[in-house]
Image (cartoon, rainbow, N blue to C red):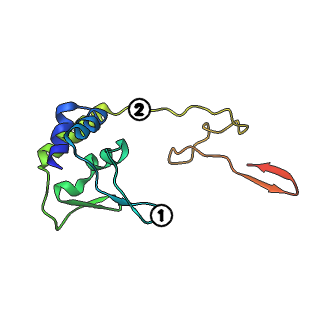
Amino acid sequence: MRTIFRRYLALGSIGLLIDDLHRRGVTPKARIGKDGGSVQPTRFALGPLAYILKNRVYIGEVVYRGEVFPGEQQPIVDRELFEAVQARLKAGAVVRTARRSESPAFLMGVLHDDRGNRMSPSRANKNSVRYRY
């Protein structure tokens, strides 16, 4: 884990980190597949690697319902290293905006609830008639 955190700081990109770990022969742990058999991935994927880099468990903390508590486990990664990685991740984050789709629901993406979340359309079918709301 320390190597993953250090290499991310050195490289500055999760994509480059994936390639670097693959060259070094570092692979994710095996998991159980849909058929019940063991699946051994050959390289890390972007999502799980980003999750590892953001996981507070590695600094000895546990997050429960949005609150951070000290964990019973010993930290694996130094807090300074973890905070440096978080700052690098935040600096490299891309703000994405949602595009309006070509949906027949013409207000989709325009209406928002009281917390700023986009509202999405619903529909119901009754007697071969589609009702949209």
Q: Report the front residue among 87 and 73.
A: 73
Which residue is at 61% across, 40% downward? 111
- Provide the secondary structure element on which disc 1 rests: loop
User: In the rendered structure, which disc, 2 or 1, sits on the residue that comes first in sequence?
Assistant: 1
| For discs 2 and 1, the disc positioned in front in the rendered view | 1
User: In the figure, is residue 97 to the left or right of 52?
Assistant: right
User: Where is residue 60 drawn, in percent x and y?
Assistant: 17, 59
Residue matched to label 2: 95
Callout 2 amino acid? Val
Callout 1 amino acid? Asp
Cα–Cα span, label 2 and label 1: 38 Å
Q: Report the front residue among 104 and 133.
A: 104
Residue matched to label 1: 35
Asked if the residues shown at circle 2 and circle 1 are in contact, with their CB atoms under 8 angstroms apart, the answer is: no
For disc 2, the neighbor class at 10 Å (few under 14, some 14 to 19, many from 20) is few
Which residue is at 35% across, 41% downward? 46
- Provide the secondary structure element on which disc 2 rests: loop
User: Where is residue 11 drawn, in percent x and y?
Assistant: 21, 31
